[in-house]
Image (cartoon, grey):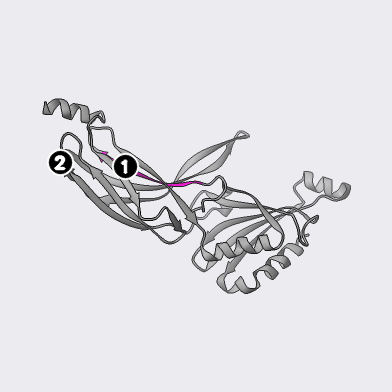
């Protein structure tokens, strides 16, 4: 009977099971994601070569004018050394790791999840998938709120493949696309995009894309050549927060 149980377990029938329980489903960028991996033995003893936690997101790439989504590993953590789990045995392995500051926040189309994998030799590996709600740093929150107070509405949030000169740790950047609905820049701009190139707890390097509104024949030609867009690279720190709206207003007015 044991032989048949082992054979079935190698195909995933009666094999060990894994379930990752997060302490919190919502975590701020830069903070620790904590929880425990729960493993339940199957019908026979099995050797677990490794348990890994992989933090994933996806971003949009374009190839031959066709857009598609690609999954990307943000972080990978090994939870245990090899061990044997007996039939019916239960094990609980706590874990803790920090969300990288470049982790995209889960707004718009952006999703972040933890994939748990058990590496079992000569068998189908059990897996588990848990979504995480990722919150921005306080500084990133201040930046996004300041843009909205200037009369812009957040229209879309998306992770997109970045040109090599804008890449930091990852091959993509998260883009926040705003449109002016009130205030001084309504009628002046078509769009205002904020891209987070890199950040820490108290600093953020941004790429601002300022898309001016078309006026007249000359502006139509400029739009056709993408000359109606300006790109501004700027670093914002926590010290800028009290005057953030004025700083952003000056940057925008300088490129109208």
- Residue 254 in view of the camera: no
Residue at 28% in and 32% down: 124
Compared with residue 206, is residue 220 higher up or lower down, i.e. above or below?
above
The residues colored magenta run 111-119
Say whether residue 79 is left or right of residue 251: left
Residue 232 highlighted magenta (yes or no): no
The main secondary structure of the magenta stretch is strand
Residue 13 position within the rendered picture, expressed as x and y whole percent measured from the top left: 24, 29
Element at badge 2? loop
Residue at 79% in and 52% down: 213
Residue 181 position within the rendered picture, expressed as x and y whole percent measured from the top left: 74, 54
Say whether residue 196 is left or right of residue 32: right
Q: Point out the image quarter for the C terminus.
A: bottom right
Say whether residue 37 is left or right of residue 212: left
Compared with residue 91, is residue 9 higher up or lower down, i.e. above or below?
above
Figure label count: 2
Say whether residue 11 is left or right of residue 153: left
- Residue 109 in view of the camera: yes
Q: Nearer the viewer, residue 203 or 184?
A: 184
Residue 230 position within the rendered picture, expressed as x and y whole percent measured from the top left: 72, 56
Residue at 49% in and 64% down: 200
The residue pinned by badge 2 equals 86
The residue pinned by badge 1 equals 117
How crowded pointer 2 is (Cα within 10 Å; few <14, some 14-19, many 20+) is rated as some
Q: Quadrant of residue 147?
A: bottom right
């Amino acid at each position: 009977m044991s032989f048949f149980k082992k054979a079935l377990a190698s195909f995933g029938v009666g094999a060990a099971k894994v379930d990752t329980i997060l302490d919190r489903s919502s975590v701020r960028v830069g903070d620790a994601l904590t929880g425990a991996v729960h493993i339940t033995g199957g019908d026979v003893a099995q050797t677990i070569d490794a348990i890994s936690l992989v933090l994933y997101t996806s971003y949009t790439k374009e190839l031959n004018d066709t857009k598609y989504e690609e999954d990307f590993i943000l972080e990978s953590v090994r939870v245990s050394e090899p061990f044997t789990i007996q039939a019916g045995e239960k094990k609980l392995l706590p874990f803790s790791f920090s969300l990288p500051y470049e982790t995209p926040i889960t707004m718009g189309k952006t999703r972040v999840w933890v994939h748990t994998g058990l590496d079992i030799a000569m068998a189908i590996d059990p897996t588990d998938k848990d979504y995480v709600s990722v919150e921005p740093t306080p500084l990133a929150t201040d930046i996004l709120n300041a843009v909205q107070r200037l009369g812009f509405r957040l229209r879309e949030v998306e992770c997109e493949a970045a040109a090599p000169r804008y890449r930091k740790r990852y091959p993509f950047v998260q883009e926040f696309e705003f449109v002016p609905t009130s205030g001084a820049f309504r009628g002046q701009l078509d769009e205002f995009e904020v891209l987070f190139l890199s950040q820490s707890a108290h600093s953020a390097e941004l790429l601002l894309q300022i898309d001016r509104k078309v006026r007249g024949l000359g502006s139509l030609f400029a739009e056709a050549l993408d000359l109606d867009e300006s790109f501004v690279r700027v670093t914002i720190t926590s010290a800028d927060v009290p005057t953030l709206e004025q700083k952003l207003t000056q940057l925008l007015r300088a490129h109208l």
